Image (cartoon, grey):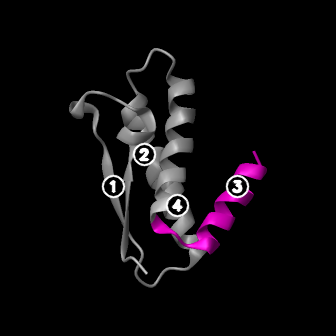
Amino acid sequence: MMRTVTLAAVAALALASSANAQEVRISLAGKSAAQIHSDIVSAARNVCHKATATESLMLDAYTRCMSGTVKAAVAQLGDPQVAELEQVRLAQR
C-alpha cells in the first residue's frame, strides 16, 4: 500500500495558472481507512478553500474542487475501503 497520497486541487479546478497550484501530502502509515478518508476530506477542504478564495462563484468552485480533489485522491490511493467510505459520504449529502 502507498505510504502517502497527494491531493492536487489544480486537477480538480482545471486551472491554467501554476501560481494557483495547491498540493498536500497525507501520511498513511498506521492509519485506518476511516482516518485516511477523514484526512483526505480535511486536506481537500483546506486546499480547496485556498484555491477558490478569489473565484467569483466561490461556492460553486469550492464544491467542484472538493468533489474532484477527493475523487482524484481516493482513486490515486486505490483502497476499496476508503472508496466505500467516500461513497457513503456522498450518499449522505
Find the distance from the CA under tag 2 to the CA under tag 4.
17 Å
Find the distance from the CA under tag 1 to the CA under tag 4.
14 Å
* Cβ atoms at labels 1 and 2 below 8 Å apart: yes
Closest to the camera, between mark 1 and mark 4, is 4
Identify the residue position indicated by label 1 in the image.
24
N-term-proximal mark, 1 vs 2: 1
Identify the residue position indicated by label 3 in the image.
89
Label 4: few (<14), some (14–19) or many (≥20) C-alpha neighbours in 10 Å: many
* Cβ atoms at labels 3 and 1 below 8 Å apart: no
Label 2: few (<14), some (14–19) or many (≥20) C-alpha neighbours in 10 Å: some
Q: Which residue occupies 50% across, 27% down?
A: 61
Q: Which residue occupies 67% across, 65% down?
A: 85
Compare residues 53 and 70 and report the one nearer the observer: 70
Q: Quadrant of the C terminus?
A: top right
Find the distance from the CA under tag 3 to the CA under tag 1.
21 Å
N-term-proximal mark, 2 vs 4: 2
Circle 1: element type? strand
Identify the residue position indicated by label 2 in the image.
46
Image spot of residue 74 (x, y percent):
52, 60
The residues colored magenta run: 77-93
Q: Is residue 46 above or below residue 79?
A: above
Closest to the camera, between mark 4 and mark 3, is 4
Find the distance from the CA under tag 4 to the CA under tag 3.
13 Å
Q: Quadrant of the N terminus?
A: bottom left
